[in-house]
Image (cartoon, rainbow, N blue to C red):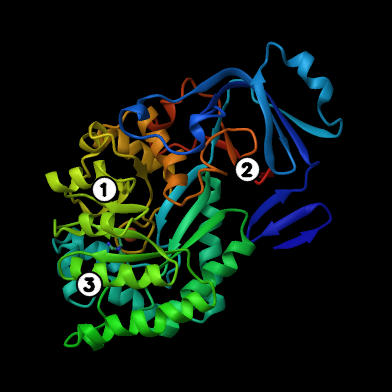
Amino acid sequence: MIFNSGLIIATGITYIKMPEAILLKNIKKIVQCGNDARLNRISGREMASLPCIDDGWLLIENGFISTFGQMNGFEDKKTGFPSERKEIDCSGRFVFPTWCDSHTHFVFAASRENEFTDRIRGLSYEEIAKRGGGILNSAEKLNAIPEEELLKNTLERIDEIIKTGTGAVEIKSGYGLTLEGELKMLRVIKKLKKLTPVTLKSTFLGAHALPAAYRDNRDEYLKLITGNMLPAIAEKGLADYIDVFCERNYFTPEETDLLLEAGARFGLKPKIHVNQFSILGGVATAVKNKAVSVDHLEVLGEDDLYQLHHSSTIATLLPSCSFFLGIPYASARKLIENDITVALASDFNPGSSPSGNMNFVVSLACIKMKMTPEEAINAATINGAAAMELSGELGSVAVGKKANLFITKQMTSPAYLPYSFGSNLIESVILNGKIIV
Ligand code: NIG
Ligand code: FE
């Protein structure tokens, strides 16, 4: 990022250097706003409510939400405001907390549209993987690409999702599958934490697929993860979480258990891929290991619901993966009826969800999973933040939280956002109290 005469430039996105205070006035509605319950997570049936303030104002100071209220009564309040401030008239516009995208694979070396065309011709995701496509294809390319180039590609992708309103992202490794490759990915994520205004969390996914070289020797690869990768990652503080692709043809629940226990010894909590294609008992393994989240859940059994209902593990659903692969959508309604905390994420990756647009994710959740707009917005903001353990600082409009907000174009109601799928309704994005042009 370059600081130069009032402008901060990071790969294509320009941030205008502002006075430290910004006042948003005449806001049609401040969405997802309140100082109490909205500090943590919203579960199950409570997700139906989305607190809003009509005709509001909001003051940002030094990167944080300083105070907000309704326009009537504003004149009395404003005497205490900093005199040097930028004012933005938000008439007809809505202010939302930025999206919190808690499951992505943003760091990758190359796109895979050839597999996309193969699937159009009739091959399945699993068949493509068996032929050496899929994750192993991405791993080969990742191991060949220089670290600097990987960083540059990823920064460009992050700039793109900022424009669609995302302010916090979890990024996984898992396309290295060698010690050096995994460390390279995690170093890129660590550098990104400094280079972008987006808040980032990093997850080690060494068990994303079994590399071909270990086909007849699974245990050796597990040993490489537990004996070499994890110690190196922990020593350099390169990851916040551990993930495993617990799935038929990938890793079993027993292997997952072993890996999560090893991760815990190095201080990494689990967030795992589970139940994308098959029910193997991975949800119970995740819950037993106190996973922060279980992600995918396109297939779901009664025991999975029971396990999640009796735990604080978040169910993270990835509808754009279902859309792109043509696989079933997760049963959001069943999860909500069982009072489970549901989050929504993009799963941005080159194989099963090549889009990080959270507006589309929220639309799909409403259209295909029958989540109400209120539920989907809760899932993509406060619950996404909770799935990254960031809900104390992000995910809702509350005093003291980071000023990560987006202002919509003129629209009629919060539901208009998911309703008008495919339209870009975001007019501006504010991250850490700075407006992005
Ligand atoms: O979440 N399911 C496993 N991992 C990714 C896909 C990775 C890939 O195909 O490259 C997912 O869908
Ligand atoms: Fe994924």
Q: Is mark 2 within 8 Å of ligand 2?
A: no
Instruction: Measuring from the top left, give residue 183's x and y in whole percent.
Output: 47, 78
Task: Please name whichever residue, 188 or 15, is drawn nearer the observer in this view of the structure.
Answer: 188
Q: Amino acid at mark 1?
A: Phe
Q: Is the residue marked by circle 2 packed among few (<14), some (14-19), or many (20+) residues within 10 Å? A: many
* Residue with the mark numbered 1: 323
Q: Position of residue 46 (x, y in %)?
A: 36, 27
Give the mark toward the camera: 3 or 2.
Answer: 3
Mark 2 or 1 closer to N-term? 1
Please tell me which of labels 3 and 2 falls first in the chain: 3
User: How many discs mark residues in the rendered view?
Assistant: 3
CA gap, disc 2 and disc 1: 32 Å
Q: Which residue is mark 2?
A: 402
Horizontally, residue 200 falls left or right of residue 63, namely: left
Which mark identifies residue 255?
Answer: 3
Q: CA distance from mark 3 to mark 2?
A: 39 Å
User: In the image, residue 149 lies at what x, y percent?
Assistant: 54, 75
Q: Nearer the viewer, mark 3 or mark 1?
A: 3
Residue 369 horizontal side relative to residue 421, left or right: left
Residue pushed farthest right?
83
Which image quadrant: the C terminus? top right
Q: Between disc 3 and disc 1, whose residue precedes?
A: 3
Q: Is residue 96 above or below residue 315?
A: above
